[in-house]
Image (cartoon, rainbow, N blue to C red):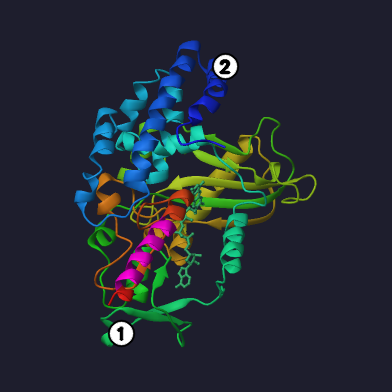
Amino acid sequence: MKTAASSSCDTVVKQWQKRLRRFSNKVEAASFHKFCSWLEDLYRAEMNSFIDTNFDSPLDLVRPWRDGLRLVQMGAFRKLDKKIGSFFRDDRLQRIFSFQSMYAGLAPYEALSLYAVITYMDSVEGVYFPEGGMHAMATGLANAVTKAGVQIRYDSPVTRILRSAGSRGAVVGVELGGSERVVADAVVCNPDLPVAYRTLLGGVDAPRVARTGKYSPSCLLWIAGVKGMPPANAAHHNIHFGRDWNGAFKALIEDGVRMPDPSILVTLHSLDTQGLAPDGHSSLYVLEPTPNLDGKIDWSRERDRIMGDIRERVGRLGYPTDVVVERIYDPLDWERLGMERGTPFALAHTFRQTGPFRPNNIDKRVPGLFFVGSSTVPGVGVPMVLVSGKLAARRIGDYAAIRGGR
Ligand SMILES: Cc1cc2nc3c(=O)[nH]c(=O)nc-3n(C[C@H](O)[C@H](O)[C@H](O)COP(=O)(O)OP(=O)(O)OC[C@H]3O[C@@H](n4cnc5c(N)ncnc54)[C@H](O)[C@@H]3O)c2cc1C
């Protein structure tokens, strides 16, 4: 077990250095130690004071002044690509350790070094694959809350959040399927926040940043069961970067068009979990980042052509592509699934859309309503969304205490 003071770097540095010596050279490998310590310090300074915390005002950013000062001293407000470049000269390593800003919807040249905290989680704490696939996490959580006495109602969409005092007071429950009413003292709302405001809270505008803010790029996702096995050197996750680095981000984020030489992620879940595909078959998960629906691609016309390109590229890379069964999700599908601007990655994490500037998990206009998920604090991704649940629970505790004290 790790103690508070123990360092995750101690565990991974040797392994990384061995890898980097082989992949790059001795000098770069030696730099990893310093880089890892920097990442770990960054994580420690950010986690308690700025990620695992509720915000009531922008002043909450300066109150934990020791961690704030530490971040300034560490260069956390410099641009990410420049900061990573100060550790590594090999531009391939600069890319490997900075592309994670894309998870937050930002290019490495525009993101602040603060976001290297994602690189820390990815490269130092490590990437884990739940036995049984990602869905095992959802069933694990469902089992835990059921054990704690929660009753889960599946296939029962909430159609309205009910409020007292002619729809202006505190929440009093939810309406399911357009008719059934469930009474509640507090409602935790998980649908994408701007969509929830629009569809469930008739008459209350979403916070301005959710209405007018900059949304993360989206993705085209191809999930398939295919005949055949992947190449022998394939890993669970395989990222195939395009050559034009900054041009790719510019296309996606600034111009709203497809990357000229797209980077793709190919994940092979069946490599590590027996039973996910029959013998001699594989599961294929291919993700290409694309602009969201604010971009210039007309998905109703372009989807088949883009999918054709992706199939061909994946085949050329040596993966099997003889499809037995498949599903494809483009930004229009994400929108149909309830995601604002057709992106499953919510508001981008620009500084002005993070922490106290991100839509809050409470809204003074709607007492008793608590938001969780990627479009509120702290932000996008499974780890952050799990923290959002913890933050909402704290809010509910405070709300219950105030109501109890009346
Ligand atoms: C292709 C893809 C790859 C990703 N890869 C990663 C990754 O590698 N690592 C990572 O950390 N994150 C990844 N993410 C992001 C991560 O999945 C999301 O950030 C996270 O799941 C968002 O959680 P959420 O609770 O906000 O939303 P969701 O997981 O979308 O949950 C919202 C839930 O609310 C339900 N809902 C909506 N409206 C209603 C209603 N009216 N009534 C009742 N229920 C409703 C929905 O059905 C859904 O179950 C990925 C996402 C995608 C799409």
Question: Does 398 sit above or below residue 154?
Answer: above
Determine if the C-beta at disc 2 is less than 8 A from ligand 1.
no
Q: Viewed as shown, does residue 33 lie left or right of 285?
A: left
Q: What segment is highlighted magenta in the picture?
A: 388-402
The residue singled out by tag 1 in the image is: 164
Mark in front: 2 vs 1:
1
Q: Residue at x 71, y 31 (%)?
A: 232
Q: Amino acid at mark 2?
A: Arg
Q: In which image quadrant can residue 312 be found?
A: top right
Q: Quadrant of the N terminus?
A: top right
Query: Where does residue 209 sit, x and y in percent of width and height?
Result: 25, 58
For disc 2, the marked residue is 22
The residue lying furthest to the right in this view is 279
Q: Mark 2–mark 1 contact, CB under 8 Å? A: no
Q: In the rendered view, tell whether residue 11 sits above or below residue 354.
A: above
Residue 391 in the magenta stretch? The answer is yes
Above or below residue 311? Residue 197 is below
Check disc 1 and report its element: helix, strand or loop. helix
